[in-house]
Each structure stands twice: as C-alpha cells, then as structure tokens.
Amino acid sequence: MVAATWSNADEERLRAEVALDEPWAFIELCTGLTRLSGSVDERRAFDHLAGRLTTWGIRHELHEPECFISWPVSASVTMTSPDGASRMLAAKTPAMSPSTGGAAVEGLAVHLPSRYARGTDDLFASGIRSDDGARVTGKVVVTEGLPMPAKVADLQRLGAVAAVFVSPGVRIHEGICTTIWGSPDLDSAGRQPRIPVAEVNRPDGEALIAAIAAGGGDLRLGVVTELDTRWRPIPVLVAEIAGTEEPERFALLHGHVDSWHVGIGDNATGNATLLELARVFAHHRPRRSLRIAWWSGHSHGRYAGSTWYADTFAVDLLAHCVAHLNCDSPGCRWADTFDDLESTEEAWPLAEAAVRDVSGVQAIWGRPARAGDYSFMNLGLSAAFMLSSTMSEAARAERGYYAVGGCGGNIAWHTEDDTLEIADRDNLLRDMRVYATAVSRLLNAPVLPLDFRRTADGFAQTLGRYQAAADDRFDFAPAFEALAALRVALDRFYVEIEATGGDSAGAERANAALLDLSRLLVPVNYAREGRFRQDPAMDVPPLPDLAPALTLGEFAAGSHDDRVAHQSLTRGQNRLVWALHQAAKVAAGRGDGTA
C-alpha cells in the first residue's frame, strides 16, 4: 500500500504522452532571453508559459510580489605592486554584494588558501577557520572557490575589507553571496553583506596569488563593484490541476525561471518540464491536486519567489501540501546518472523508484543542501528532487570538469556558455518521464508513498555519530529512548496500513498521520529556526540542534565554551525529544493536533 513502486493503469499512458514539442519550443525561446529576476526578458518567458496554460484551459494565477532583488552590473580588481605598477583584472561581482559607489575599496592583499568544491554537496562549505582572523583583519582577501554565502560571511566576520574569489575555471561563474534566505526581515536584514566581493577567473587568480607571494605582503588590491539592488516586482506563476477525490490536498511541483545569461540547462529545461507536465496531467486528472509554480527571484534574490510563496500561503501549505518536488537542470547533455539525487529521507523511496522504473539507473541519495528553492523545510514539507540527472564523478573527471551546482554537471553552469547545446533531447524526455512518474504516484497512490521508518533510521545513525563524538561529555539517552519508541510505533503504523487493504477510511487516517509526521520530523532534521521563519542560506547538518556535539572535544571540560555548548545541546535535545514523542503519538493514532 505505501510502496513507492505503486502505480495504476493510467501511469504508463501518462508517461507515453510526455513529448518534446512544447518543452523544446520554450527552450528555444529562452535562447534569446537573459532572464534577470523582474526583467522584461524574464516576463516574456512567463508570458509564454501563461499563454500555453490559457490555451490548454489550465487554471493559473500570476502573482507580482515586491521582493529584494540584486542585479550585478560590473566589477574590477586592480593590483598594485610595491614598485607602483598596476594591472586591472576582469571580474564579476555576485548578487547582493554591496556597490562601492564608483570608488575602489583598497587594502593590502593576503592570500587565504582554500580549496575548490569536491562535489555538489561541498559547494556551500566555508573552509575559513576562525584562527585566520589575525591575517585577514583590514586586508583584501584572495581565496579559492566560489563566493558562497558562508565563506563571504566568515571573511566579513573576521574583518576583511573586501574579498576576491578565484573561480575554478576559465569562465567566471555568476552567483549570489548573501546568507539571507528570501527577502530580508527584521531578524535577517543585519546579515546583508557589507564588504565588496569580486570574482576573477582561474588563470588571472593564479597570477594574482603568485603576485601576492612575490610582493612580500606589500601588494595592494582595489575592488570596485556596481550592482542594482532594490525592491522590485517579480512574477510568480502558479497553475493548479484539481484532484478528483482529494482536491484539497496537493503536491507542489516547482522550479525557477530567472537565470544567469540565457540559462538553458539552468533552468530553461526545468521550466519546460513543468510546462509539459501541466499539459499531460490536465488530461489525466489525478486523485489529489497538482500545483505547479514557476518562480522568479531564485538567482538574484536567494529564492525570493519561493520564499514569498512559503510566507504568503504558509497555512495552506501546512494544512494541505503532501510534499514538494523541485525541478532544476533536467535534460542536460552527458547526464547519464542520478548521483546525489536529493530528497528528504522519507521521500527517497519514491524518487529512487521513479528513476529506476523509467531509466533503469540506480539513483544515489543525497541529503538536501540548504539551497535550490527548498523554502519549505521550516514548514515541515517532505521533498523529492532538487537537481536531476547528472554526469558521474568519473565522467566529469574524464572531461576535466570540476564540481558545479547544476546543468547536469556541465561547467557551463552560471556562465555565458549555458546555451542551447547544453540541453539534450533524449535526456530531457527521460527526465520529464521520471518526474511524471514520481508526481503520478504521489498524487494517485491511496496512501502517500512516504516512509518515515527511513527517517527514524537516519536519526539513529546521526545520534550515534553525535554520541560517539561527545563520548561521556553529553548523554543523548533521552533522545535514543524516544527514538526507539517512535520506531516501534512506526513499525506498527505501517503494518496497520497494509492491513487496511486500501479502504478509503484507513487510507484517510494514514494520510492525515503522514502529514503530521512530516510537520514534526522534517523541521527538526533540516531547520534551526521556527516554523514560520527561514534558516540562513548556509549548511544545515542533520539534527542541527545536536550538531554541537561534534565540537565538544575542542573545549576544556567545565570551561565557559563547554558550558555554553552543553546549554545548547540540552535545549536542542528537548526540542528533538518532544518532536519524537509527538510523532510516536501520531503513529499510534493518538495525535493531538500539535504537529
């Protein structure tokens, strides 16, 4: 009954109807559109999408919220050697870096060695150590890698006056450097970056690092940045295909339209996939409703569009959304694996089975990063997919490619090279059918295909790792005890689901419980902030409230830092134990509505 491979007679027909004509026409349109968030070009893409929905008679609404959006305009880095000779390097600045007002921010240069990301799950790591502060304060820091939020925030905290990042390739990758998720509020506005950030390509960056070494600490750098950062209206298009039996419940399928340059692999192919699934599901009315959202504000507002939607429709999402599925970078060339396919633990069997049944490929699970329009974790929504198919690590190495965050592993990601040749017709057709299969099962299975036993088992592994790190410095026995009770309750819960034989009353009770379980267990595993807040755009470790256990060994027993860490762990364990107790009640049929 809860098997992720559940299917009905309509599924094969639905997959067979997925075709390339409509999606490819949209992709070709995008080859002439630079889709900055809130721009005229982006609106042309949205108008095309809305026009096709209108033609097919699909109900939809175009929202135009005002969000905080940043368009990079220009940047330069000038290095001046001790003898007065100067050289200007071509550079880019990431969205949300401050503008320097036409003047250079100057200082002595220091090279702070870092490393390039080894994989997509490593892209958001900082790699900056607190003990680097003495070298950084008052300097213009040069470091390897992309200007990701955590790294920029750490350099600012340590006192750098500006930062210059060395891109991993010949092309400079566009990006955004703020830790603020979505538009700022009173709690997050203070985290807006205050130091100018520039990025140079690898050949120039390596020459710059060599010049710093040769300058004996006397090389000066000047950084100039210009950005257009302000509140502006952006489009958010939402279509809805009403379910036939449970219309109030819906799955949210979504992806971003805004892009860097023409952005074919990131994310015209994803937008095209959503359009085609809208067309197909309109002919195959599902049991539950399908809500499809095309966002703006992903690239230039740190997921501003999806965050606005999470804020504006929070109560509806909490009450009725069964799960959300993100669609980013499907159908790219050479993408023949589904490695690091991200989903929350309970939704993984659904994603894995959809990939296997359509492509024959064994997918490899990845824990969702704090990225990719996953703006619904604090609300407690289960999730499947973030990126889609990709090249294997071996295939990337064979081509001399480094890790990037989309485009199926093509290093055209976030550059001028992300053009039509990045899309692959055969791969796109396959990936659209993978999504169609997962969506169909999520919408049509009598009992939602979410397995929280996998979630509980993941908690057990994480707790075991944290207890081993803490040794006898902190006792997680209450959490282990509560988790064991939940696992017993879940085993009984799923046995009872199978015993119902699919009767409607039993399925309804099970689905109500599954939604409560997601609202309880997803946030404690993926969020630190409250239900209606957003965590920073930085790495969130598993069971984040208990992750300080990994650093207990750094503090002398009984010291101030040790006591602070214990205080945090005590409060974090309380939060987890309470959620586990409530989840056990839900699984046992004694939920009291506190999810």
Image: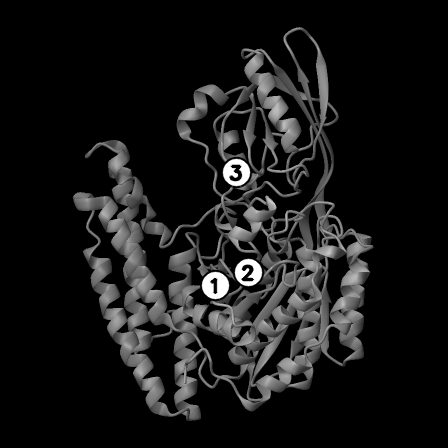
Asked if one can make out residue 25 in the rendered structure from this viewpoint, the answer is: yes
**Can I make out residue 65 in this image?**
no
206 or 22, which lies in front? 206
Question: Are discs 1 and 2 less than 8 Å apart at CB?
Answer: yes
The residues bearing labels 3 and 2 have C-alpha atoms spaced at a distance of 22 Å
Q: Whole-percent x and y of residue 111?
A: 53, 23
Which residue, given by chain and number where applicable, does mark 3 sit on?
116
Disc 1 marks which residue? 343
Q: Earlier in the sequence, mark 3 or mark 1?
A: 3
Name the secondary structure under disc 3: loop
Q: Marks 3 and 1, Cα distance to the nearest angstrom?
A: 25 Å
Q: Nearer the viewer, mark 3 or mark 1?
A: 3
Picture coordinates of residue 400, whole percent (x, y): 59, 43
Query: Do residues under tags 3 and 2 come within 8 Å of each other at their CB atoms?
Result: no
Residue 277, picture quadrant: bottom right
Density class for disc 3 (Cα within 10 Å; few <14, some 14-19, many ≥20) is: some
Which residue occupies 64% across, 43% down? 175
Q: Amino acid at mark 2?
A: Met
- Residue 286: image quadrant is bottom right
The label on residue 386 is 2
| Quadrant where the image shows the C terminus | bottom left
Which type of secondary structure does the marked residue at label 2 adopt? loop
Which residue is at a point 47% across and 42% down the rendered structure image?
Answer: 125
Say which element carries label 1: loop
Direction front: furthest residue: 398
